[in-house]
Amino acid sequence: MSNKTALLYSTVDGHTLKICQEILAVFKKNNLQIDLFSIDNFNKNIQDYNKFIIGSSIRYGLHNKQIIAFINTHKKELDHIKTAFFSVNLVARKPEKNTPETNPYVVKFFKNIDWKPTVKTVFAGMLDYKKYPFFDRLMIQFIMWITKGPTNKNTKIEYTNWNKVTAFAEQVCQL
């Protein structure tokens, strides 16, 4: 097995991919090989990697179904290597909900899946109402209203703590 890492992600509006790009930069800075795959086009063998990172955004309270299916299908292979998981969601913008133990989406995810990654974390995402289709914008505004977040249709806020992303990537590099 070579010293290679795979980074598999799903994204709805592109922000999870932006986080992946930062993780790639950290690996390259450390002279480590890493391959980036969208969940839609992963066609390699997990055994070709000694580390595997999975990142998924949340939409309407759920992680991508393909990510869940991938983990369930490949659990045995994932259990034999070092793994990392990160979730990207807007609830994580709140300090009391920005850890895997306190983020309701991540807690629910791991209650419903039989997989224990070596490292897991959660990152706050980005709110950009102008990017969303009409129905999505209304739903997200409603969710934000309930959770006391911004609801103005012109709002664009990046909540991601990039130092936390870098620290996570460095941690995975050391595995």
Image: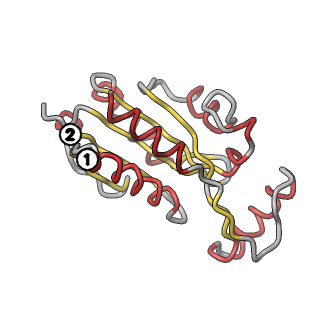
The dot on residue 99 is: none
Looking at the image, is 100 positioned above or below residue 155?
above
Measured from the top left, where is residue 12 in percent x and y?
53, 61
Whether tag 2 and tag 1 are in contact, CB under 8 A, the answer is yes
**Residue at 49 percent of width and 58 percent of height:** 11
**Residue at 72 percent of width and 69 percent of height:** 137
* Numbered disc 1: secondary structure: strand
Residue 76, quarter of picture: top left
Q: Nearer the viewer, residue 64 or 37?
A: 37
Mark pair 2, 1: CA separation: 6 Å
Measured from the top left, where is residue 134 in percent x and y?
71, 76
**Residue at 46 percent of width and 38 percent of height:** 168
- Report whether 25 appears left or right of 33: right
Q: Nearer the viewer, residue 89 or 29?
A: 29
The dot on residue 4 is: 2
Residue at the left extreme? 1
Q: How many marks?
A: 2
Pointer 1: what residue? 34
* Quadrant where the C terminus is found in the figure: top left
Kindly identify the amino acid type of the residue bearing the numbered disc 2: Lys
Packing grade of label 2 (10 A; few <14, some 14-19, many >=20) is: some
**Residue at 57 percent of width and 48 percent of height:** 88
Packing grade of label 1 (10 A; few <14, some 14-19, many >=20) is: many
Measured from the top left, where is residue 119 in percent x and y?
45, 28
Measured from the top left, where is residue 31 in percent x and y?
22, 45
